[in-house]
Image (cartoon, rainbow, N blue to C red):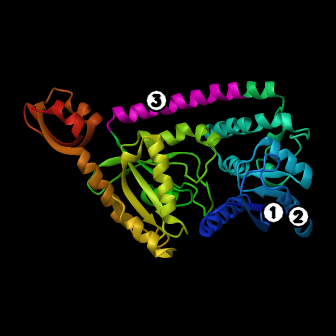
Amino acid sequence: MVMSVLLINIRQQGEDERMTLLREKETESLLKTLSLPVALTVTYTLREINTAFYIGPGQAENTLECLRATEAEEVVINAFISPRQEKNLEHLLGVPISDREAVILAIFFQNAHSREARLQIAKAEALYLKPRLQNREANLSQQRGGVRGAKGEGERKIELERRLIDQRMRALDREIGSVENIRKTQRKERERNGIFSFALTGYTNAGKSTILNALTGAGVTAEDKLFATLDTTTRALQLPNGQKVLLSDTVGFISDLPEVLIKAFSSTLEEALSANAIIIVADASHPDAYGCLKKTKETLFNLGALEKAKILVINKTDEIYDEIAYASLLREPYRIVETSMKEKRGIDKLLSAMADITDESYRTVTITAPISSDIISRIAKDGSIRNIDYSDDSITITARIRKDLAAKYAE
């Protein structure tokens, strides 16, 4: 039997009702990703945060009455609460309590497939558990349903003593460091080979993986769920101008992404930082499409990568939710490409826009050299060869080379 949860949605005093509703719907989508039905959503307005329960004592008592009426088996509070507040609420309500961080962490654990992603999630979970040890008397290794149970695979049997968690974190740091070194080596190799790279970024569930599949046939999992993709996937493709490039999918952004997960996935987010150009994907069907774009730009700015954003893909234009937000997206200072992956519209325009970006970074050169030289292998490392003509004692090559590397071939 699938358990149900009672969702507590928090509204700050003076907050716009539309933003409160959007946050509620987003949290319900997070719980849907965990296959957890919401029995009831209760919205509380907070004048101030209560040190004991986060919500007020009266609101906590009201929550108890709602639990009795709905028979929900877990409470999810759409906020970041302290270990002490979590313990007090569990004692009062008699059911497990999960905050926003626990929900997102559970989804990340559920959707992590690669070794790197699983290592990062294991570390993030250890960081989340550590401050809660001194406030918990219950055996956290006990299996149960809901948000915590969704983490599965017996990870709740992990040693709870602080010393053992510290040992586990040190071991994870060593393993993560090893994987990151491999990623850095691969990055340097791409840079050395002069391969132009694009990174797909954007709010979670905007359609990045679907676009990657449409352009490259990557076969990446693309579901109508939040954070369906956590593992960075990179594929090669050839643009209409003949330029060979790399295209990477990256983990989606979301409002109030827990700091522990930002740190855990810092190496994955660096894919956006290391790319030559960034493609932002916006979801026209989202109720707060422009707000999601602002959150994406804010995250890219914090990564030091916003200046690399060159193309804005407005996806899901077959389901535009808000015409005003849509009009705002169209005014953004990027190359705008409108797409509907569902209707397979806009793919050619996106490829053309990507080709235009590479045209700004590459130049076509014609080089003549002695036939005995190593010119072919040298050019192949720095660009793409388009044509080769041989004469008795020389070779003439037409190639596209990055502008910053073309000077060394000047006659």
Distance CA(mark 3)–CA(mark 2): 53 Å
Give SS at disc 1: strand
Which label's residue is closer to the chain start, 1 or 2? Answer: 1
Residue ID at (61%, 51%): 256
Which label's residue is closer to the chain start, 1 or 3? Answer: 1
The percent position of residue 218, horizontal first and vertical second, equals 49, 53
Which residue occupies the foreground of this view, 70 or 250?
Answer: 70
Which residue occupies the foreground of this view, 194 or 337?
Answer: 337
- Observer-side mark, 3 or 2, equals 2
Which label's residue is closer to the chain start, 3 or 2? Answer: 2
As displayed, is residue 213 above or below residue 157? below
Whether tag 3 and tag 2 are in contact, CB under 8 A, the answer is: no
**Residue 6: mark:** 1
As displayed, is residue 38 above or below residue 408? below
Whether residue 88 appears in this view of the structure is yes
Report the residue that reaches farthest toward the left.
Answer: 392
Would you call the spot at circle 1 few (<14 residues within 10 Å), some (14-19), or many (20 or more)?
A: many
Whether tag 1 and tag 3 are in contact, CB under 8 A, the answer is: no
Would you call the spot at circle 2 few (<14 residues within 10 Å), some (14-19), or many (20 or more)?
A: many
As displayed, is residue 308 above or below residue 294? above
Dominant secondary structure, magenta: helix
Q: Would residue 46 appear left or right of 52 to someone viewing this image?
A: left
Would you call the spot at circle 3 few (<14 residues within 10 Å), some (14-19), or many (20 or more)?
A: few
For disc 2, the marked residue is 67
* The quarter of the displayed image where residue 371 is located: top left
The percent position of residue 269, horizontal first and vertical second, equals 51, 42
Which residue occupies the foreground of this view, 91 or 264?
Answer: 91
**Residue range of the region highlighted in magenta in the rendering:** 169-194
Give SS at disc 2: helix
